[in-house]
Amino acid sequence: MTQVNPKHRELVKAIAIGDTDRAKELNESIPQQERADYHTFVTAFFSIMLELRFKEDSSREAIASFVDEMRYDYRKADPPIKPMVIEGVIRASCGEEHLLDDISGADTLAAEYQVIGKIAVQSPEVIQNPDHYLDEAEGLFAEWESV
């Protein structure tokens, strides 16, 4: 089974619990040759968070409503969020993969960070036991890597 780099796991945990200073510090320490694996792990955790948030309803309307919440929550973000990118990344993860064709890897990663931050911080179950969700993401990462 493919193992997730412990530093990658620690960085995603910092993002999930809202420890932005630690996340920035860890992000700067990841070498370029590890970025692809790191991004795959972020995407796995992002997928777990989407499942948590949208398990009952992943319709376009539910996604648009969530993005509207993000627009409000991040209204003072600098740099500002990109709501259409966020919506595209979420919808792509829910089956409309073609939407990623026009979204850069950097924008995808930024959107995933922002969505993880919102869902995780607003989910008591994630804040109380982030390692459970990180373990799930590791399993998904390993599954993807074995394909």
Image (tube, helix red, strand yellow):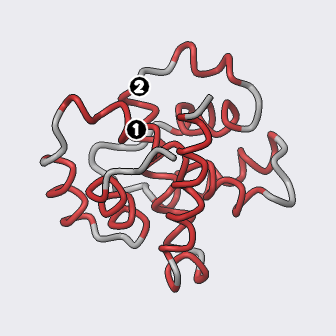
- Dot 2 crowding, Cα within 10 Å, few <14, some 14–19, many 20+: few
Q: Taking 47 as reference, is 121 above or below it?
A: below
Total tally of numbered discs in the picture: 2
Q: Residue at x 13, y 48 (%)?
A: 29
Using residue 21 as the reference point, say whether residue 56 is left or right of it.
right
Circles 2 and 1: CB distance less than 8 Å? yes
Q: Which labelled disc corresponds to residue 39?
A: 1
**In this view of the protein, which residue sits in the foreground, 14 or 80?**
14
Using residue 54 as the reference point, say whether residue 141 is left or right of it.
left
Q: Taking 6 as reference, is 140 above or below it?
A: above
Picture coordinates of residue 118 (x, y %)? Answer: 51, 63
Q: Residue at x 61, y 58 (%)?
A: 49
- Dot 1 crowding, Cα within 10 Å, few <14, some 14–19, many 20+: some
Kindly report the distance in space between the C-alpha atoms of the residues bearing marks 2 and 1.
9 Å
Local SS, label 1: helix
User: What's the amino acid at mark 2?
Assistant: Gly
**On the image, numbered disc 2 is attached to which residue?**
105
Q: Taking 117 as reference, is 144 above or below it?
A: above
